[in-house]
Amino acid sequence: GLGRLYAETQAQGLQVDFLVNNAGSEGPDLIRTRDWPRQDAYIRLMMTSVAAMCHEFIPGMLERGDGRVINVASVAGRMTVGGDYSYGPTKAYLIALSKGLASAFGPQGVKVMALCPGFTHTEFHMSDRLTEMKQATPEFIWYDADVVIREGLAALEKGKDEHTSGRLYRFIVPVIRQRWFQGLLKLMGVRL
């Protein structure tokens, strides 16, 4: 449907100056779900669709010398978590894609940023498994969507190519990525 979406905007004479790519789904287990078409559909949703939207809409922004793109990634794309070989890696791709686009086209007036929220109150957690997980986590790690959006828009306008929303996540993600912290967790029997 991506080609049709672009064609429809062109047919209606619409000019896209601000693009927000917010594809997200829990996804199948890459190894245990033995259904490649389902895996492929997940990869297309999480990565290919975002790349295709950038492919279609950024050239017009470049012609005008102005545009904004937010690719919604996740803090999961900034760290390696044991057993996450689907969601986090797709979000890591969005971070890398966004940084590459920002570096190439920021000087030409097109700002591109990966927005990396942590746990956010949205419909994403409405599946049985994720609702159960949400209920088992402390409230203080959850942010309202309006906070994530407000922070993201401000960071984009400052020219950032990546932004982690929420003070808690801006503090904890760099700590979690440290080898000493990983070792401490391992000693405690916690596996990320």
Image: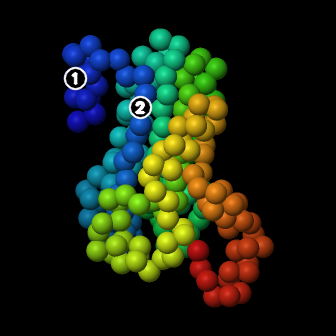
Residue 19's disc is 2
Position of residue 172 in the picture relative to residue 117 (left or right):
right
Q: Quadrant of the N terminus?
A: top left
Picture residue at 22% right of the left edge, 23% below the top: 8
In percent of the image, x 69 and y 61: which residue is there? 171
- Where residue 125 sits, quadrant-wise, is bottom left
**Can residue 92 be seen at all in this image of the molecule?**
no
Q: Is 30 situated above or below 184?
A: above
The x and y percentages for residue 189 are 63, 88
Left or right position of 125 against 104: left
Secondary structure under badge 1? helix
- As shown in the figure, which amino acid type bears the numbered disc 2? Leu
Q: Residue at x 68, y 88 (%)?
A: 188
Residue beneath disc 1: 8
What is the CA distance from the residue labelled 2 to the residue labelled 1? 15 Å
Of residue 88 and residue 146, the one placed in the foreground of this image is 146
Depth-wise, is mark 2 or mark 1 nearer the camera? 2
Q: Quadrant of residue 180?
A: bottom right
Question: Foreground: 153 or 16?
Answer: 153
Say above or below: 82 vs 15.
below
**Quadrant location of the C terminus?**
bottom right
Q: Is residue 87 above or below residue 161?
A: below
Q: Residue at x 39, y 45 (%)?
A: 22
Q: Give x and y (percent) for residue 128.
A: 28, 74
Q: Residues within 10 Å of mark 2 (few under 14, many from 20)?
A: some
**Circle 2 SS class:** strand
